[in-house]
Amino acid sequence: MFESAEIGHRVDKQRWKEASTRLRRELLQAQYRLLQDARSAVVILVNGVDGAGRGETVNLFNEWMDPRHIRTEAFGPMTPIERQHPEMWRFWQVLPPKGHIGILFGSWYTDPIQAHVREAQTHDRFAHRLERIRQFERMLVAEGVVLLKLWFHLSKKTAKARMKALEADPKTAWRVTPQQRANLRHYDRFVQVSEEALRKTSIAEAPWIVIDGSDPAYRSLKAGQHLLDALTHAVTRPKPARGRPERRVPAKALGEQGLLAVQDYERRLTRKAYADALETWQGRLALLSRDPRMRRRSLVMVFEGMDAAGKGSTIRRITQALDARFYRVVPVAAPNENERAQPYLWRFWRYIPGHGKAVIFDRSWYGRVLVERVEGFCSTADWTRAYAEINEYEEQLSEAGAVIVKFWLAITPDEQLRRFHAREQTPHKHHKITEEDWRNREKWPLYERAVEQMIDRTSTQVAPWHVVASDDKLWARIEVLRLLCERLERALDKVGRKR
Amino acid sequence: MFESAEIGHRVDKQRWKEASTRLRRELLQAQYRLLQDARSAVVILVNGVDGAGRGETVNLFNEWMDPRHIRTEAFGPMTPIERQHPEMWRFWQVLPPKGHIGILFGSWYTDPIQAHVREAQTHDRFAHRLERIRQFERMLVAEGVVLLKLWFHLSKKTAKARMKALEADPKTAWRVTPQQRANLRHYDRFVQVSEEALRKTSIAEAPWIVIDGSDPAYRSLKAGQHLLDALTHAVTRPKPARGRPERRVPAKALGEQGLLAVQDYERRLTRKAYADALETWQGRLALLSRDPRMRRRSLVMVFEGMDAAGKGSTIRRITQALDARFYRVVPVAAPNENERAQPYLWRFWRYIPGHGKAVIFDRSWYGRVLVERVEGFCSTADWTRAYAEINEYEEQLSEAGAVIVKFWLAITPDEQLRRFHAREQTPHKHHKITEEDWRNREKWPLYERAVEQMIDRTSTQVAPWHVVASDDKLWARIEVLRLLCERLERALDKVGRKR
C-alpha cells in the first residue's frame, strides 16, 4: 500500500504559494458550510511513520481553518481510569457533534498496531481488533460521521536521514525521543504490521489515504485537498433515510405463541412472604455490592418494559440496598439536542461506570429497536443494524469487566389497563398517565413483536435478557433481586480467573 | 438467540395438511420463476443441533421441489486434496449458478464451531474465522446470491429425550452415532459457541433463522415458509446496478508522477548477456520446481500488462524451464456464459493448484479492477469492493501454502505503438493486433490510473506486485525470472518453520 508514497513527490515554492492560498480559502468556506448544514461530523485520523509530518499537519489544519469548531485530541498510553473502561470509551468521549471537526492525533489504530509490532498479541488477536475497528467505523459512517483516515508515510531511507539530520543539529536534537529511535529500529516490522492494518480497514465507507510525507509542501497540499473533499462530501451526501411508523403485525401463519405470551403471569407472593424475601435478598445484594472483588468489576443494569410495568418501583427496591456512592440511576427519555447530534450509542457510553461502580438504566439503548423502530424515528436500515451494534457494545463492556444484567418486565395488556385506570384515579399518580400512554397501548402488538425480536437477537452469553412476568409486582421485585444477586455472585466467582 | 426456539411450538395434523399442500405448490412455482428469471442463485445452509431435523428438512425440500435444479451437498471432514487448498475452496466448487438452488448440509460454519467446541483453537482464532465468513457472505450477496441460513434448534431436555427414544427402539438405535453421543455431552458448550457464531454472522444481508426443531410439522412449515420468502426475494430484488465506461482522468493537481511513470524504461540487455542470464535463471527455476520442499507449497503466478507488453513471450521463458506435469497456463479472456452465472472470483478458484503444482494466469481476477472498471462492465460499487475481496482471496491462498507472484509488465505508450506497427507488418503476428487494441490504447490514461490504484491497494506482504519495466523484452524476461526465483527461494526457506 505504500508503493506510490515512496516515489518522492515534490512541490516547488511557486506552486505551493498559489495552491496553499487557494486551498486555505476553500477549506475555511467548507468548514462554515459544514457548521451550517450540520448534517455530518468530520473525524480526521492522523497516523503514520515518525517524522512524516503528522504533528505539522495537525497544526496546519488548525491554522488554516477556524480552530473554535475543531476539537484536536492527542492519545497516548491509557490512563488508569481509561483502563477500567472498554478500549473505545476514550474515543467516544471526544467525538465531535454534527457540524464540527475532530482531529485525532493517534487513534484507535495506534495501540493494536504497536501491540502487534511488539509481538505482545497474537496475529489472531490483532485481526480481531481490526475487525472491531471496521465495525465501529461502519457504524460511525452510518450514523452521519465522515471519516478521513490519513496515513503519513516515509521510506526507511528517508526516515533514517530525517532522524540523523535532526540529531546533528543541537537546536533540534531534543526532538528525537528514545521511543522514536526504537521505532526506527523496528521500521520494517512496523511498516509490515501497518500495511496489514491499513489494508484490512480500507473499507469502501472509509478508505485509508496514504500520503508521501517526505516533502512538507506536497504533503500539506495533498492532505488539505483530501480534507476539502471530505468536508464537501459531508455537506453533499444524501440525507439519511427517514423512518415510517410501523403499521400492523402480520398474523402468525402457524398460530404460534411468542416469548411474551408463554410467560406464567399467575405467579403471586403474599405481603408476608414478600416482606421476608425482600429482607433476605436486599441484604444479600448489599453484601455483594461491598464485596472486595467488586473493585475489579462494574455493574450495568438495564430495565425495559411496557408502560406501567413497574420499572421505577422495582429499581427503588434495588437502590434501597445500595450505598448512594456506589450507583447511579439514569432515566432515559427522548434524546436532547446535543444527543441528537451524536451517534445514538454516544449518550449511553457516557454513563459507563468505572470499576467498583454501578449504573441502572431506566430504559436504555434498546429504545433504538423498540420505540424508535415502532414509531419510525429511525429507518429500517438503522434499527436492523442496531442488533449487531448493541451486541458488540455489550461485549466490549463485558470484556472491560462489566456485569450486564438486563430485565424485561413483562405484563399482560389487561394488567396494564388496570394500572392505567388506577393511576387516573389516584391523585398522586395522576401525572404518570398521559395521552401518549394510551396511544402506545394501541400499538401493543407492534411493540410485542419488536420486544420478541429484540430478545431473540440480543440475549447473549455475556448479556442475557431476563424476562420477568410482572403482573404481580411483589413477585416480580423479588425475582429481579434474586436474578441480580445470582448473576453478580457468578461473576464475582470468576474474578481472578482467566477468561 | 435460542429463546423463541425453546417454546415448544406445535402444529396439528389438520393444519399441517392444509398448509403443507399450499406451501408445496407455491415452492414449486417459485423455483421455476427463479430458474426463468436467473437473476440470483439461492444457497441454503442447513445447520443446527443433532436430532433437530436437518436431514429430514433437506429431504423434504428435495421432495417438495424439482430436484433437477437443486444441488445438495453434504460436507464432512476435509479430504487430503481439500486440505491442500484454502478452507473455502470446497464450497466454491459447489456454488449453484444463477437460477439454481444449492443446499449445503453442514457448511462453512461447521468446522469453526466444532474446532472451538473442542477448544482446538483460541477464541481470537474463532472470531477471526467468523469475520472471514462474514466477508465471504457479504461478497456472495453482492454477487447475486440469496443466502438462507437455517439453524435447527432443540433444547437440552428435548435433545436428550429424543436420543433416548431412538436408542430404546432396536429399529432406530443404529441411528445414534458415537459422535452424536459425544455432541450431547458437550451440548452446553456447543450451544454457547453456536450462539456466538450465529450472533456475529447475523448480518443484515443474510441473518440466521433459528427454527424450533422439536415438532416435525412446525419445523417443516417454518423452514418451507422461509425458503419461499427467499425464493421470492431472489426474483424481486432490484437488478444489480449497471456500470458506465470511465470518461476522463482528472489532471493531477500537483503535477505528480505515478508509479508507472517513474519506472526506468531505459534498461537494456544485449543478446549475448540475455542468452547467458536466461540459461542461469532457467536452470535455477528448474531446480526450484523440483525441490522436495515444493511438495508442501503451490505456486500461483499472475501476469498483467497493457496490450503487447510481452506477457505471452515472458510466460514461455518460464514454462521452458518447467516439467509439463508441474504447471498449467490459464489464459483469461471475457467470461463465458457459465462463468457469468457465478461470482467473478469463481472461475479463478477453479484453477487453484494443489501442493507441488503451479498455475500461471495470463491476465487474471485483476480484470475486475482494470478492464471491467474502465469499460464499465461492472458498477463502481463492484470494483471498489473488489480490492478487499482480492486481498482476502490471496491471503487465503497464501495461508494454504501458495506462493503468489504477481507481475505488471510496464511499457511506455511509444513502445506499445512500435509493437503495434510491427505486428501489423509481420504476417505471422498480424492476428495479434485488432481494432480493440487500438481502442484500448486511446484509453491509456484511464488504464494507467486503474493500474496504479490496483497496485497501491493490492500489493500486500503475502502477494506483492512486481512492476517490471518491459520496453526491452530481454531485460524484462530476465528480471521476471530472477524475481520469481528469489520469491520461491525465500518461500521454500520458510517451509517447516511455523508462521
Image (cartoon, coloured by chain):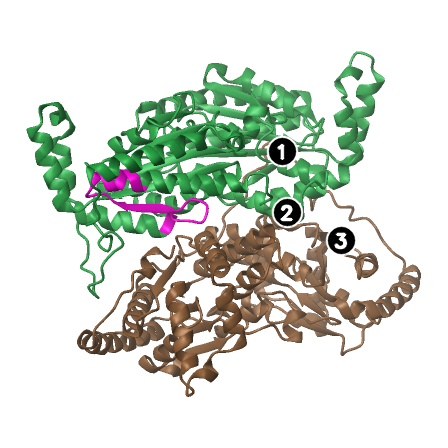
Chain colours: A green, B brown
Front in this rendered view, residue B182 or B304: B182
The residue that mark 1 highlights is: A110
Q: Position of residue A250 (x, y in %)?
A: 19, 57
| Residue located at (29% from left, 60% from top) | B7
**Chain under label 2?**
B
* Mark 3 to mark 1 CA distance (whole Å): 35 Å
* Mark 2 to mark 1 CA distance (whole Å): 28 Å
Left or right of residue B403: residue B378: left
Amino acid type, mark 1: Thr
Q: Is residue A250 above or below residue A418?
A: below
Amino acid type, mark 2: Glu
Q: Secondary structure at mark 1?
A: helix
Q: Secondary structure at mark 3?
A: strand
Give whichever of discs 3 and 2 has the lower sequence position: 2
| Residue located at (31% from left, 24% from top) | A337
Amino acid type, mark 3: Val
**In the image, residue B401 lies in the stretch drawn in magenta:** no
* Mark 3 to mark 2 CA distance (whole Å): 13 Å
Front in this rendered view, residue A13 or B284: B284
Residue A321, located in which quarter of the rendered image?
A: top left
Instruction: Give the magenta range.
Output: A457-479
Q: Position of residue A172 (x, y in %)?
A: 78, 15
